[in-house]
Image (tube, rainbow, N blue to C red):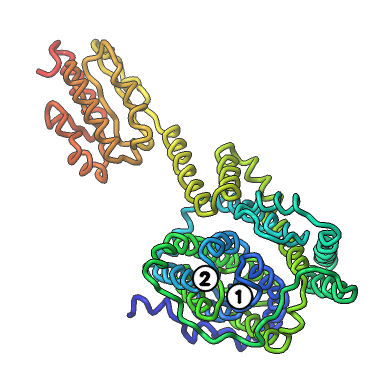
């Protein structure tokens, strides 16, 4: 229990509230205003419905704020989750949503309990930015049918669906929807430029809704919303359904963990908001998704945009995120009727603008100019995200990053022939001294050792191993095989300077056993050269 006590809420979480509560309340109200249109839009875009988006922002927002590992993280439905969740709902139906929430939340919770929060550091920056770009493209394309009022079924692939909806546009209905989406986009663009703290998205939606009502435009709206939170309902755990949803839920869990940890890490750098605990953050996000599923919500993640708004508005404690959720609850209780009349095209406009802001042009330019491998990772991850799947994109990006990293390590490693130090003596031309440096691992061992194996007119080889920084079983085995091959040709091999931390592996894999004599190991170069010269002087190596 003591080991896991740090994963639980404590009174220390609210130690600064007496000093920061005014700023936290103001920040919470600001974030709530910003979150309202996003929660509605993400709910609609995922296929779960506007009510589901609001429920997620409320329930998950409170649970994650209380149990999470960040003092300022704001959680709820996000664009990345919509990208993954949409195909799942399309394939398995809305009834599977609660089960997906429970399974994904349970996986994230388990990862937190197992202390896996630090693994986010293993995802390279170009991969993160690449799938962020891919998500942004998909979110934008997903809004095209709503923005032009295209009805009917479309492909699950966002690119194909956008093309199908454009091809089936019906005028003048498409024109009315497009006009409303444009109104919201223009208001957001102008408002954010002139007054960054101005709730431009909410004003844009209000203006578009007023226009639609005033002129009785024939456009689709959100529709009826509950005037309160629904009663909690346990998810279905039918064995056959669980088997079908296990892999999709794992993908949702992976995304929830990655996005939440990234958001919390970025939030900790925006202001002096205290440290964050990545393991506790996973616990909080896992519980938030499970709780949201009971109330008809979606899996939740940390939302970097809303979190950043809160921090810049003065958030310094968990009170801000809790206030944001309570404001949304108040809107549901007293304003459900007004919210139900919002045109779907207006929400599409919000998400289209949001998508264009997800990736910084400056960041993309930096990555593309950094190096060819980084540019490759960035473009490859983005392309796979759009064309295949986000989780496949992350896995592929990490795999390619690993290959490229090994390639760089192999290039930085090498084997160099050296002159024998001191005055030359007769027979020194029959002695070859090699310095092996860097990483002698599977990616580099064959190339490095090949040069030594092709030696001719040499009777003794001295291998200087003290500069080998990394040795794995493959590298050690290649060294053993090279020594055996040279010894079969009558060439004596002397090892100098095997590091203490590598000696055990070298012994277990057979490097030391491959030497002709146990005394062919040396701790200093002078002793190895003296022994090599004695072999040459005898005229009969190995005697």
Identify which residue, 307 or 408, lies in the foreground. Answer: 307
**Residue drawn at (69%, 78%) of the image:** 32
Q: Residue 365, percent across and down?
A: 68, 45
Q: Residue 356, percent across and down?
A: 72, 56
Q: Which mark is residue 362?
A: none
**Residue drawn at (33%, 80%) of the image:** 1
Whole-angstrom CA distance, mark 1 to mark 2, is 10 Å
Q: Residue 180, percent across and down?
A: 83, 65
The number of callouts visible is 2
- Is residue 228 visible in the rendered image? The answer is yes
Q: Secondary structure at mark 2?
A: helix
Give the residue pinned by disc 2: 97
141 left or right of 182? left
Report if the CB atoms under discs 1 and 2 are less than 8 Å apart.
Answer: yes
14 left or right of 475? right
For label 1, the crowd category at 10 Å Cα-Cα, with few meaning under 14, some 14 to 19 and many 20 or more, is many
Residue farthest toward the right in the current orientation of the protein: 215
The answer to whether residue 488 is above or below residue 291 is above
> In which quadrant will I find the C terminus?
top left
Quarter occupied by residue 424: top left
**Residue drawn at (14%, 33%) of the image:** 513
The answer to whether residue 151 is above or below residue 430 is below
Q: Secondary structure at mark 1?
A: helix
For label 2, the crowd category at 10 Å Cα-Cα, with few meaning under 14, some 14 to 19 and many 20 or more, is many
Q: Earlier in the sequence, mark 1 or mark 2?
A: 1
Identify which residue, 9 or 163, lies in the foreground. Answer: 163
Q: Which mark is residue 52?
A: 1
The answer to whether residue 238 is above or below residue 243 is below
- Is residue 20 visible in the rendered image? The answer is no
Q: Residue 55, percent across and down?
A: 60, 79
The answer to whether residue 323 is above or below residue 518 is below
């Amino acid at each position: 229990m003591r080991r896991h006590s740090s994963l639980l809420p404590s009174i220390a979480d609210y130690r600064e509230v007496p000093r920061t509560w005014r700023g936290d309340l103001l920040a919470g109200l600001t974030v709530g205003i910003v979150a309202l249109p996003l929660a509605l839009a993400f709910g609609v875009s995922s296929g779960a419905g506007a009510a589901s988006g609001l429920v997620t922002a409320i329930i998950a927002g409170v649970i994650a704020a209380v149990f999470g590992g960040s003092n300022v993280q704001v959680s709820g439905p996000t664009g990345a989750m919509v990208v993954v969740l949409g195909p799942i709902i399309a394939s398995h139906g809305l009834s599977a949503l609660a089960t997906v929430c429970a399974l994904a939340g349970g996986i994230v919770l388990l990862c937190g309990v197992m202390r896996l929060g630090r693994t986010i550091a293993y995802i390279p920056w170009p991969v993160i930015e690449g799938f962020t770009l891919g998500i942004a493209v998909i979110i934008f394309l997903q809004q095209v049918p709503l923005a032009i009022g295209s009805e009917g079924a479309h492909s699950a692939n966002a690119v194909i669906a956008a093309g199908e909806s454009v091809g089936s546009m019906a005028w003048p209905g498409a024109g009315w929807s497009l006009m409303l989406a444009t109104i919201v986009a223009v208001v957001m663009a102008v408002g954010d430029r002139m007054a960054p703290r101005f709730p431009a998205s909410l004003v844009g939606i209000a203006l578009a809704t007023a226009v639609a009502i005033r002129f009785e435009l024939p456009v689709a709206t959100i529709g009826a919303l509950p005037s309160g939170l629904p009663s909690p309902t346990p998810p279905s755990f039918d064995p056959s359904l669980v088997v079908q949803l296990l892999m999709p839920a794992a993908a949702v869990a992976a995304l929830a963990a990655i996005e939440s940890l990234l958001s919390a890490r970025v939030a900790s750098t925006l202001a002096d908001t205290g440290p964050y605990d990545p393991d506790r953050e996973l616990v909080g996000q896992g519980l938030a998704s499970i709780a949201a599923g009971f109330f008809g919500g979606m899996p939740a993640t940390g939302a970097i945009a809303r979190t950043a708004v809160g921090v810049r508005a003065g958030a310094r404690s968990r009170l801000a995120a809790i206030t944001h959720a309570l404001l949304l609850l108040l809107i549901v209780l007293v304003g459900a009727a007004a919210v139900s009349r919002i045109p779907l095209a207006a929400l599409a406009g919000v998400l289209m603008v949001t998508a264009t802001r997800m990736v910084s042009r400056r960041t993309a330019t930096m990555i593309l100019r950094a190096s060819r491998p980084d540019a490759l990772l960035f473009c490859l991850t983005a392309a796979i995200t759009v064309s295949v799947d986000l989780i496949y994109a992350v896995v592929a990006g990490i795999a390619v990053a690993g290959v490229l990293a090994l390639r760089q390590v192999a290039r930085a490693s090498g084997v160099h022939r050296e002159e024998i130090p001191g005055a030359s003596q007769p027979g020194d031309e029959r002695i070859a001294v090699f310095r092996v440096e860097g990483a002698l691992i599977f990616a580099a061992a064959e190339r490095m050792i090949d040069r030594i194996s092709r030696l001719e007119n040499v009777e003794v080889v001295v291998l200087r191993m003290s500069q080998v920084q990394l040795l794995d079983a493959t590298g050690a085995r290649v060294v053993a095989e090279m020594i055996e091959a040279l010894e079969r040709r009558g060439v004596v091999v002397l090892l100098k300077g095997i590091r203490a931390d590598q000696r055990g592996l070298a012994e277990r894999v057979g490097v030391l056993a491959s030497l002709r004599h146990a005394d062919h190991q040396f701790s200093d170069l002078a002793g190895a050269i003296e022994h090599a010269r004695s072999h040459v002087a005898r005229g009969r190596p190995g005697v």
